[in-house]
Image: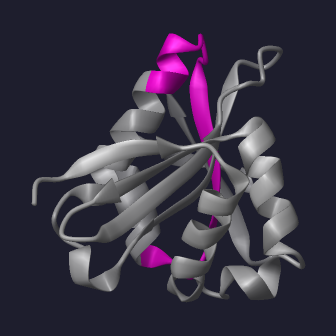
């Protein structure tokens, strides 16, 4: 099976994806978000959610690219299964975010990442993100110009 990236735009599909990748995040999404079904509805209404398949569902990305005042896109979630890591899938998903955000007139992409998540921070730095500001005692904001 070839890699395939596609948009998911229905709440039920987004909900299934959030649950599928729940334990990939630290802490798990279900521990951070009180109602994943309601959150899936918010993403359906306001975000872009893409899934990548490579011998099964291997990763997903969720981002907002609708803040036309600041012209900043917001990368909310990016996850790739442990089995599929190291194959460039996260980069392919990030490229979708970059291209769509550019098409929508965004000037940069901002994200929040936990300070202890060194692997993610290194990934974002390799992909032109830089430290922006402290978000909380546990996380930082990073930004990338488009």
Residue 121 versus residue 98 in the image, above or below: below
Q: How is the image coloured?
A: one colour
Say which quarter of the image contains residue 81.
Answer: bottom left
Q: Position of residue 51 (x, y in %)?
A: 42, 54
Of residues 40 and 27, the one nearer the viewer is 40
Q: Residue at x 73, y 24 (%)?
A: 66
Q: Position of residue 146 (x, y in %)?
A: 47, 22
User: Is residue 36 visible to us here?
Assistant: yes
Q: Left of 145 or right of it: where is 133?
A: right
User: Is residue 127 visible to us here?
Assistant: no
Q: Left of 66 or right of it: where is 78?
A: left
Residue 20 lies in magenta, yes or no?
Answer: no
Q: Left of 144 or right of it: where is 12?
A: right
Q: What residue range appears in magenta?
A: 100-118
Q: Residue at x 78, y 88 (%)?
A: 31
Q: Residue furthest left?
A: 1
Q: Position of residue 112 (x, y in %)?
A: 67, 58
Q: Residue at x 61, y 79 (%)?
A: 19
Of residues 80 and 14, the one nearer the viewer is 14
Q: Left of 44 or right of it: where is 83?
A: left
Residue 92 versus residue 85 in the image, above or below: above
Q: Residue at x 39, y 35 (%)?
A: 96
Residue 11 versus residue 118 in the image, above or below: above
Residue 105 lies in magenta, yes or no?
Answer: yes
Q: Position of residue 93 (x, y in %)?
A: 37, 47
Say which quarter of the image contains residue 57.
Answer: bottom left
- Quarter of the picture holding the N terminus: bottom left
Residue 98 versus residue 36 in the image, above or below: above
> What count of labels does the image hold?
0
């Amino acid at each position: 099976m070839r890699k395939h990236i596609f948009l998911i735009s229905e709440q039920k599909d987004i909900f299934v994806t959030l649950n599928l990748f729940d334990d990939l995040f630290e802490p798990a999404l279900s521990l951070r978000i009180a109602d994943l079904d309601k959150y899936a509805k918010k993403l359906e209404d306001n975000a872009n959610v893409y899934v990548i398949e490579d011998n099964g569902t291997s990763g997903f990305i969720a981002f907002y690219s609708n803040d036309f005042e600041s012209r900043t896109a917001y990368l909310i979630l990016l996850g790739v299964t442990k089995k599929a890591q190291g194959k460039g899938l996260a980069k392919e998903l990030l490229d979708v975010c970059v291209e769509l955000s550019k098409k929508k007139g965004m000037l940069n992409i901002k994200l929040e990442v936990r300070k202890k998540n060194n692997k993610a921070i290194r990934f974002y730095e390799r992909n032109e993100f830089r430290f922006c500001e402290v978000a909380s005692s546990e996380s930082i904001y990073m930004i990338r110009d488009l």
